[in-house]
């Protein structure tokens, strides 16, 4: 262990070394109450932890180092939108992973543990090690659960390098997607999407479009039949973009079956079984199968006092504060929240500053501010190499396009948008967002501390 720590200190740099020292202190510290406790060090957790610290500093009421603490036992932080790029052969998966400790500034404390239970009536949580931690304010940004076992045979198929089954929805399997796509010379390629809530609902077809374009450019298009099998009733939730994507699908000769949910895989016989809306099932032969697994709330949140009946942290859709007055010191954002919008990194860019302003106002005055989240989210829909349809919308599935006044209708596929996804967004994420300094192209509320 000492050799590993020495090696880490040599390569990680001074910021990570400071964080490592702080994390080691945190694991043995007798201090068990914090001003702000953040659950989860993903996109939402890191962003909001930094923004909260910056907001207090901008108000002339700076917090002490360690007043903001983040709980997360993960070793690495991932830029998950990059996994689609990996699946399309546009990057290495290691480009989209950083040691988690390296992303904490010295003034944000990191405790490398996970939460087991919430006790909102006493403003405390317990960790999986049995430790009790109290807080003045709580921010839950824990993400969601990917249910790999929700499809019979899927874990085994993903583990088999010759199965033809892959998924962009994990770090471990996203490179298998590109290996399978690039190796296919003929046959049936099926791309699936489940009904219900998933991370980035456009991603299942992004990788399909990229595969289609790869086959066209490499002269294999006539030998490979592509089908989109989705549990949803349409191509996309927003009608404007759905209509454009369906027209593109027809133009490109891609088949589709709607309200078809993948329920099992027989990898040895290359058969996939789908359940239809009427309850009947249908088998489809595949040569390549890209799977989007079903997803849902995390077990430690589901059934807790802060969750709604579906298992999401129940917050007001405008203020991001818990809906129960007795839990008024609790906020949530991102995938774990009950916010009725798509679960994307883009959504967090608009959610975080609103949450930050309202949390600061509650801690300072006891009341929320005028900051309101309008449901803004975005889905950069890759439709081929060098082109992308930039879907942006808000609550009620109403388009909210940032560039339409300058470039025209955003159903038009553009090379500029492609480079946003491929180059600008990853750079902005690692250099601005995780530091709390990226607010997206059209966030509804411009924070006072920018």
Image (tube, grey):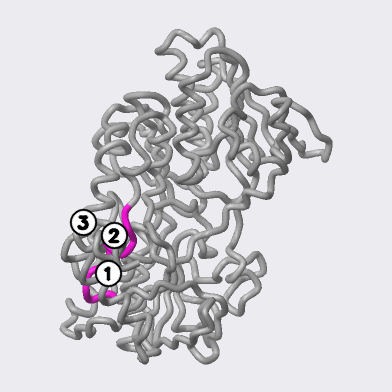
| Left or right for 19, reference 264 | left
The residue labelled by disc 3 is: 11
Where are the magenta residues, as a range? 98-108
Numbered disc 2: secondary structure: helix
Q: Residues within 10 Å of mark 2 (few under 14, many from 20)?
A: many
Residue 336 visible in the picture: yes
Between marks 3 and 2, how big is the CA–CA gap? 20 Å
Numbered disc 3: secondary structure: helix
Q: What label sits on residue 50 in the rendered view?
A: 1
Point out residue 398 in the picture as x, y percentages from the top left corner: 46, 47
| Front residue of 180 and 259 | 180
Between marks 2 and 1, how big is the CA–CA gap? 8 Å
How many numbered badges does the structure rendering display? 3
Point out residue 291 in the picture as x, y percentages from the top left corner: 59, 37
Residue at x-position 52% and y-position 92% = 122
Q: Is residue 187 above or below residue 346?
A: above
Between marks 3 and 1, how big is the CA–CA gap? 24 Å
The residue labelled by disc 2 is: 434
Point out residue 159 in the picture as x, y percentages from the top left corner: 59, 39
Place residue 301 in its image quadrant: bottom right
Residue 104 within the segment the image draws in magenta: yes
């Amino acid at each position: 262990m000492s050799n590993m720590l020495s090696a880490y200190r040599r390569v990680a740099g001074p910021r990570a070394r400071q964080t490592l020292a702080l994390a080691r202190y945190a694991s043995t510290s007798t201090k068990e109450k914090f001003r702000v406790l953040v659950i989860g060090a993903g996109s939402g957790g890191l962003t909001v932890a930094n923004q909260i610290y910056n907001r207090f500093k901008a108000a002339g009421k700076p917090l002490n180092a360690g007043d903001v603490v983040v709980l997360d036992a993960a070793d690495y932080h991932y830029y998950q939108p990059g996994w689609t790029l990996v699946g399309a052969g546009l990057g290495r998966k290691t480009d989209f992973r950083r040691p988690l400790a390296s992303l904490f500034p010295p003034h944000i404390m990191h405790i490398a543990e996970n939460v087991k239970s919430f006790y909102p009536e006493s403003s405390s949580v317990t960790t999986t090690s049995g430790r009790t931690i109290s807080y003045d304010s709580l921010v839950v940004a824990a993400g969601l659960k990917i249910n790999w076992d929700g499809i019979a045979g899927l874990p085994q198929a993903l583990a088999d390098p010759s199965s033809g089954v892959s998924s962009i929805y994990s770090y471990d399997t996203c490179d298998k997607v590109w290996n399978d796509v690039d190796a296919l010379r003929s046959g049936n390629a099926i791309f699936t999407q489940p009904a219900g809530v998933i991370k980035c609902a456009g991603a299942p077809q992004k990788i399909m479009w990229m595969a289609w374009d790869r086959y066209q450019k490499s002269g294999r298009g006539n030998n490979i039949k592509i089908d989109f099998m989705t549990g949803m009733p349409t191509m996309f939730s927003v009608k404007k973009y759905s209509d454009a994507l369906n027209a593109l699908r027809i133009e490109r000769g891609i088949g589709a079956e709607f309200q078809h949910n993948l329920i099992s895989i027989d990898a040895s016989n290359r058969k996939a079984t789908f359940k239809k809306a009427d309850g009947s099932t249908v088998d489809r032969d595949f040569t390549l199968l890209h799977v989007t697994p079903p997803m849902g709330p995390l077990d430690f949140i589901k059934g807790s006092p802060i969750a709604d009946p579906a298992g999401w942290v129940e917050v007001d859709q405008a203020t991001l504060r818990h809906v129960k007055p007795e839990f008024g010191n609790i906020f949530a954002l991102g995938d774990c929240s009950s916010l009725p919008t798509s679960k994307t990194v883009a959504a967090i860019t608009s959610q975080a500053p609103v949450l930050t302003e309202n949390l600061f106002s509650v801690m300072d005055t006891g009341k929320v501010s005028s900051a309101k989240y309008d449901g803004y989210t975005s889905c950069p829909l890759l439709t081929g190499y060098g082109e992308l349809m930039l879907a942006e919308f808000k609550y009620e599935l109403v388009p909210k396009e940032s560039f339409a006044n300058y470039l025209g209708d955003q159903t038009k596929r553009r090379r500029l948008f492609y480079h946003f996804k491929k180059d600008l967004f990853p750079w902005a994420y690692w250099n601005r967002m995780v530091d709390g300094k990226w607010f997206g192209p059209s966030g509804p509320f411009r924070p006072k501390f920018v």
